[in-house]
Amino acid sequence: MSETGYNFAYLDEGTKRMIRRAILKGIAIPGYQVPFASREMPMPYGWGTGGVQVTAAILGADDVLKVIDQGSDDTTNAVSIRKFFERTAGVETTTATTQATIIQTRHRIPETPLTEDQVLVFQVPIPEPLRFLEPRETETRRLHALADYGLMHVKLYEDIARHGHIATTYAYPVEVDGRYVMDPSPTPKFDNPKMDDCPALQLFGAGREKRIYAVPPYTKVTSLDFEDHPFAVQTFKQPCALCDAHDVYLDEIVLDDRGGRMFVCSDTDHCETRRGEGHRGAMLGTAPEAITAGGNSRV
Amino acid sequence: MSDQSLLSARHLRKMYGARLGCTDVSFDLHEGEVLAVVGESGSGKSTLLSLLSTELEPTAGSVHYRFRTGETRDLASLSEAERRFLLRTDWGFVRQDAREGLRMGVSAGGNVGERLMAVGERHYGQIRGKAIDWLTRVEIEEARVDDMPGSFSGGMRQRLQIARNLVTHPRIVFMDEPTSGLDVSVQARLLDLIRGLVSDLGLAVIIVTHDLAVARLLSHRTMVMRGGRVVETGLTDQVLDDPQDAYTQLLVSSVLPA
Ligand SMILES: Nc1ncnc2c1ncn2[C@@H]1O[C@H](COP(=O)(O)OP(=O)(O)OP(=O)(O)O)[C@@H](O)[C@H]1O
Ligand SMILES: [Mg+2]
């Protein structure tokens, strides 16, 4: 029992069992949105209550928890959720991707490849990929049931017609295991290939919308596209200015009002680890302290 | 159902609770044939169209359809997936209110391309090419391909609906009052276009209208409904020039308001 007097990880055991049943069903039907009786959590919906409930339901006393928001362990949101589980479950927490057994995330998948011993829990605001074109819930359910996904391509068609290319860069729709089309939550499409054939279990929780879905380990995850406009991830012209990493997702940071800017890893743990290993980016010596330290000041 | 018929209705009946929608409607539609359904407001025309196109389930009676393979099936026996496939390949539906027949939040090209994508086309350039081709065929300039239907006139929206339906080369198009609510000159142009497409493509059409001039211009046969029942049916010229039923006589002599 933790100091606060709550049940382990806040939720009562009955609620956890209910959530675990939804998770198991989600794992059995990859990409399918399972309704669940989402509970009120002591934080606003926008803070990822769906992810928090999933984490609470799977957390064990010897788990090591990492929480990231936009790739950073130190935003207010990530810190609050980490503290919440430290208080209510007394579990160990970490910022190191390799140390964590459960990683709750909003907006990113860590750059460090995940392993079979890890579970990635996504906070999802809007789980329904078809909502953009079909607001009726009864109809979207039927479309999923019939694997009737032409509308997803209408959305991509509109993108190309308007912008000359598929301009969707976040929440880029994927087909899971050749069957269900799924919204990967507002992660950048850069992270989509990491979901494919991933050794870690991926769980998705949408609190306000009361849905849980899952991608089991080593499942095929394909980003939708056209033959003549194939899916492609964002590329960056230069490596991280702090740790010199290539092929990672970079955030643009404005340094002053005279157009000064730098591009640095969005995954702060990855960046710090690389710097610790001796990698040095072009601006490592000159960047302001607040940026090299990662943390709240970056967001 | 006769060997030649494409669609065949037998004793169709629809009750909305205690209220009659239509009853005892039977007919055969042949390939390339245009059938007009006329009658006063509330006579059951739209109800009948919804039964034929499987949007409503009949209270009694059946509709059979002959597939491209030659096989004839009772539409009630189709699975939901088969039914939807039929609706977006072999069939089309042009509605009086374009907002019901179009996706107003999607460009003209996307509206036309939707059916192609729904049946699995995945080449953007080809989908767009076909969309432009069909827009041109319904006399919408290529330059409007990326415009939203909301920026189109009433007549253009109806033409866009037609292009959106014809892109998969359907065999039957259901039309519910496609020209009403349009200016007379716009109506005339649309009717001309429909007439041309129907004969070029050999389409079968069931068109609901309360305008006998529309029936006269487009249809081979006309079915007159009143109070949910068919009161007269026959070749359009005969029905309109030499009506047998007393109600049809009133309708034709324009004693009744449309
Ligand atoms: N959804 C419904 N619920 C109850 N009654 C209905 C419904 N739809 C139609 N009806 C009734 O069924 C009858 C036939 O209506 P229907 O809409 O088929 O006529 P219509 O010939 O298409 O008329 P209009 O020319 O006005 O469009 C009318 O009495 C109508 O009130
Ligand atoms: Mg009607």
Image (cartoon, coloured by chain):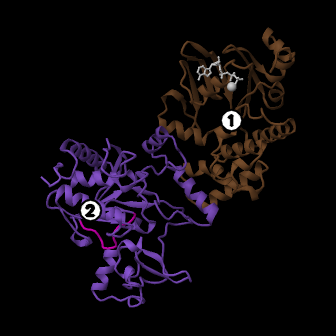
Chain colours: A purple, B brown
- Three-letter amino acid code at the position of disc 2: Arg
* Residue B186 located left or right of residue B65: right
* Marks 1 and 2, how far apart at CA: 55 Å
The residue under label 2 is A82
Q: Quadrant of the C terminus of chain B?
A: top right
- Whether marks 1 and 2 lie on the same chain: no
Mark 2, chain letter?
A
Which residue of the protein is positioned furthest toward the front in this rendering? A4
Relative to B223, B127 lies left or right: left
- List the single residue furthest toward the left: A1
Q: Is residue A98 above or below residue B53?
A: below
**Residue name at image x 46 percent, y 59 percent:** A171
Q: Quadrant of ligand 1?
A: top right
In this view, the residue in front, B114 or B52, is B114
Q: Which residue is mark 1?
A: B95
Residue A46 visible at all: yes
- Front residue of A3 and B167: A3
The three-letter code of the residue at mark 1 reads Arg
Q: How far across and how far down the image is residue A198, in percent?
A: 31, 64
When asked about the image quadrant of residue B41, the answer is top right
Magenta part of the chain: A107-115
Q: Chain of mark 1?
A: B
Q: Position of residue B112 (x, y in %)?
A: 65, 50
**Magenta stretch prevailing secondary structure:** loop
